[in-house]
Image (spheres, helix red, strand yellow):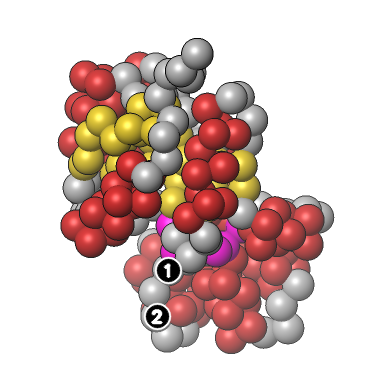
């Protein structure tokens, strides 16, 4: 008895990535590519029209983020199976994606066979997270989450701004900036501003 195929939607703004994924996955007898999208809004439209079994979603898209697209898709289809497929290894981004409703978080560097197996796992109701990301979860499990204001302050630090300049940019006092920086250093277990920025970039809390 022939098993029904897993219908897949691919979302990535790079044509070569989409073509490569299509080539790899069409070699799997139990998989079929039903659509491709180059941005988040098109992904939402196609998901509504095609109802794929699994969607492979890039994290960085030219219009809205992959996470925003996930939220929109799952608001309309709560049972949607979406896997983030990205180059970003930060656990912070992965946590955001999973909280938004993604069923998997995988890296584009993974072997094709592992990707196919992950798709099958998610289709069967399981979660699939890249081993490196899962390890980062365990490593940072006790770290407190960053508030939106703290993340904004961190981004300004990464841009090279001093406390007074950060206060002017965010319309807060210099003393408030100093308080935020203290909390940031405590939460990231960082010794100074430079180390805090380094940790934040590695974990995907901020991007430069």
The picture quadrant where one finds residue 200 is bottom right
Q: Position of residue 36 (x, y in %)?
A: 22, 40
Work out whether residue 178 can be spotted: no
Tell whether 95 sits left or right of 23.
right
Residue that protrudes farthest toward the top in the picture: 1
Q: Residue at x 45, y 60 (%)?
A: 108
Work out whether residue 132 can be spotted: yes
Secondary structure of the residue carrying tag 2 is loop
- For the stretch drawn in magenta, the main secondary structure is loop
Residue 86 or 148: which is nearer the viewer?
86
Residue with the mark numbered 1: 207
Q: Position of residue 31 (x, y in %)?
A: 39, 33
Whole-angstrom CA distance, mark 1 to mark 2, is 11 Å
Q: Residue at x 68, y 57 (%)?
A: 131
Q: Position of residue 145 (x, y in %)?
A: 66, 52
N-term-proximal mark, 1 vs 2: 2
Figure check: 65 above or below 203: above
Count residues near mark 1 (Cα–Cα under 10 Å), then give few for <14, some for 14-19, many for 20+: few
Q: Is residue 87 magenta?
A: yes
The magenta segment is 86-91
Secondary structure of the residue carrying tag 1 is loop
Q: Is residue 142 magenta?
A: no
Residue 25 or 104: which is nearer the viewer?
25
Q: Which mark is residue 97?
A: none
Count residues near mark 2 (Cα–Cα under 10 Å), then give few for <14, some for 14-19, many for 20+: few
Q: Residue at x 65, y 67 (%)?
A: 184
Figure check: 51 above or below 157: above
Residue with the mark numbered 2: 159
Figure check: 20 above or below 77: below
């Amino acid at each position: 008895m022939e098993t029904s195929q897993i219908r897949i939607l691919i979302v990535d703004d790079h044509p070569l990535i989409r073509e490569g994924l299509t080539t790899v996955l069409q070699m799997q007898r139990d998989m079929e590519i039903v659509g491709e999208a180059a941005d988040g809004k098109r992904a939402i439209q196609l998901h509504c029209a095609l109802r794929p079994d699994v969607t492979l979603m890039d994290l960085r898209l030219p219009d809205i983020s992959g996470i925003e697209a996930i939220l929109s898709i799952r608001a309309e289809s709560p049972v949607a199976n979406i896997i983030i497929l990205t180059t970003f290894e930060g656990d912070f981004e992965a946590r955001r994606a999973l909280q938004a409703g993604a069923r998997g978080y995988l890296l584009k560097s993974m072997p094709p066979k592992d990707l196919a197996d992950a798709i099958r796992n998610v289709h069967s109701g399981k979660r699939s997270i890249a081993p490196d990301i899962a390890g980062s979860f365990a490593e940072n499990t006790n770290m407190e989450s960053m508030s939106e204001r703290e993340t904004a302050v961190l981004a300004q630090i990464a841009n090279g701004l001093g406390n007074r300049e950060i206060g002017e940019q965010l319309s807060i006092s210099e003393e408030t900036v100093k308080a935020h920086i203290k909390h940031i250093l405590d939460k990231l277990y960082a010794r100074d501003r430079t180390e805090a920025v380094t940790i934040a970039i590695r974990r995907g809390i901020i991007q430069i």
